[in-house]
Amino acid sequence: MKVIGLAGWSGAGKTTLLTRLIPHFNAQGLRVSVIKHAHHQFDVDVPGKDSWRHREAGAAEVLVSSAHRWALMHELRGAAEPRLPELLNKLSAVDLVVVEGFKREPHRKIEVHRAGNDKPLLFPNDPGIAGIATDIAVETRLPTVHLDDIPAAAALLLRAAMPVEEVVARSAAMR
């Protein structure tokens, strides 16, 4: 299993790029999973539904299953937020895990930058950035691809992806 991150300011197009990359990877026969970090409280359950009521009542975990999907919600209830290696260990084996967020973790990242977002580039200050997907020319030695060139962006992500074991080892070394 390999891991690569997408980094960039809000509004840069990380999610848009990823939703275009996933079908491309699938067409190549690759299985892809995503880990997204949220900076705010979020809910994947509908208030009032049984699973929401179970969670609100204090259940540590609530697993919802149907013929189409299953989802596991784990309440931290004051415990520390898990780091990326712990979350990677919870995933089923796939070919590629794309991480959106967790910018302080030591995995390699591709910066997503859109000129219209009017934000500075991150790569000069983040040594974990291994390439840039952008809609403008950027002066750098890092590999760059255009945001709309999905085959080139996919190839960049695959080249920069690192084995999950390396992410875990780097993270342990940071502690």
Image: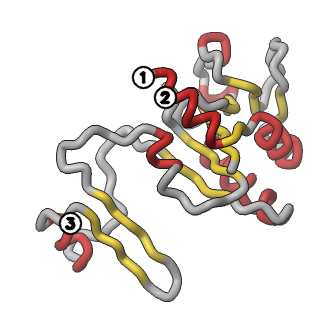
Q: Is residue 24 left or right of residue 15?
A: right
Q: Which of marks 3 and 1 is nearer the N terminus?
A: 3
The foreground one among 172 and 4 is 172
Can you say whether 19 is above or below 53 in the image?
Answer: above
Q: What residue type is labelled 1?
A: Arg
Label 2 close to label 1 by CB (< 8 Å): yes
Residue 104 horizontal side relative to residue 54, left or right: right
The mark found on residue 172 in the picture is 2
Residue 98 is tagged as none
Above or below, 111 relative to 3: above
Mark 1 = which residue?
175
Of residues 46 and 52, the one nearer the viewer is 52
Residue 47 x, y percent position in the rendering: 23, 69
Q: Is residue 15 left or right of residue 96?
A: left
Tag 1 secondary structure: loop
Q: Is residue 57 visible?
A: yes
Mark 1: few/some/many CA within 10 Å (<14, 14-19, 20+)? few
Q: Which label belongs to residue 55?
A: 3
What type is the residue that disc 2 sits on? Answer: Ala
Amino acid carrying mark 3 in the image: Arg
Q: Identify which residue is drawn at 74% across, 52% down.
A: 21
